[in-house]
Amino acid sequence: MPRIPVAPKSIQKGIPLKHLLGTEAIECLAHNILLVYPQFDEALFRRVALEGLEPIGILERGQQLARALRQCLPDKYEAAIEILLASLTPPLTKTDDLGLAVFFYLPHVCFVAEYGLDPRGNGGHDPFEISMLAQYELTKRFSAEFSIRPFLIQQQERTLSRLLEWTSDPDPHVRRLCSEGARPRLPWAMRIPAFIVNPDPVLPILESLRNDQCLYVRRSVANHLGDIAKDHPGVVLATCERWLAEASTEMKWLIRHALRYPAKKGDAAALQLRAAAK
């Protein structure tokens, strides 16, 4: 059976996150792939994965392990992705108290981000569809919010179209990705300059998710609006004012959460809207 390392529920004082992708994670990754791809060169993978690993942080470790996987999986990207997908553990069944073990899949999303856009690594064939499938499955186990961003930057229209479709997906992890992955200023991740300049293309996604049944998704919508408010407070104020007209208790919480940044800056309209949303 595929497995992932045991990890704490939350960040532990004095224990860097980078240790989540250490020797045990490398062993689990090799084990899972060998279950579905016996030709996997485990020795080469370990050697490349461990070289210079100790001083680097968790994001860099995810990227290093992705590069190690690229050396040891089939040359054609689609074939490599099919192996990675076959090696996955079952999807998450809840949206809270997920713990830190899910970071095991950071190398997988790094793999998609690094190699999933270039047809030259896929026998000349456009890898978009297999990359979308990979992110659809990975976000059910970790989050594809980091890997989806290069797609939004390089292929904005077709990626947004797919995310808009996914806003009605039955899995809350997939629906959350549609908002979280498109945030213009997502912490830890590359920014999306086009959405910082003009957030209009992502607003239909937020509209679709604003009444989502899952707080996990609604919180992401609120945080996304909070990002937009840093550059376009007027857009967020107008959106929240419109939503407030027929707001449920859950929507009022979302509005208050979304307006935290302008409210802290003393924006009178934001303060008034937050008060009205209580």
Image (cartoon, helix red, strand yellow):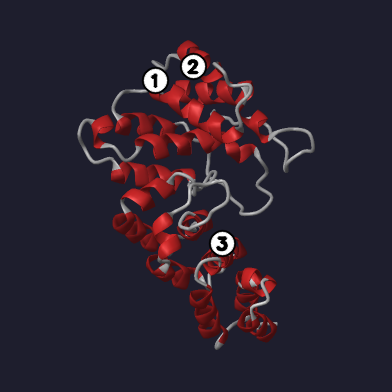
Q: What label sits on residue 121 in the rendered view?
A: none
Closer to the N terminus: mark 2 or mark 1? 2
Q: Which residue is mark 3?
A: 220
Q: Badge 3 local density, few (<14 within 10 Å), some, or many (20+)?
A: many
Q: Which residue is mark 1?
A: 71
Q: Position of residue 6 (x, y in %)?
A: 68, 32
* Residue located farthest toward the right when viewing the structure as drawn: 13
**Numbered disc 2: secondary structure:** helix
Label 3 amino acid?
Answer: Ser
In this image, 149 relative to 51: left or right? left
Closer to the N terminus: mark 3 or mark 2? 2
Label 2 amino acid?
Answer: Val
Q: Position of residue 141 (x, y in %)?
A: 53, 44
Closer to the N terminus: mark 1 or mark 3? 1
Q: Are marks 2 and 1 in contact (CB under 8 Å)?
A: yes
Say if 228 sits above or below 144 in the image.
below
**Numbered disc 3: secondary structure:** helix
Residue at point 62% right, 72% down? 262
Q: Nearer the viewer, residue 125 or 51?
A: 51
Q: What label sits on residue 48 in the rendered view?
A: 2
Residue at point 54% right, 79% down? 237
Say if 178 sits above or below 42 in the image.
below
Q: CA distance from mark 2 to mark 1?
A: 9 Å
**Numbered disc 1: secondary structure:** helix
Q: CA distance from mark 1 to mark 3?
A: 36 Å
Q: Nearer the viewer, residue 170 or 267?
A: 267
Q: Position of residue 173 (x, y in %)?
A: 52, 54
Q: Position of residue 39 (x, y in %)?
A: 39, 15
Label 1 amino acid?
Answer: Gln
Q: CA distance from mark 3 to mark 2?
A: 36 Å
Q: Badge 2 local density, few (<14 within 10 Å), some, or many (20+)?
A: some
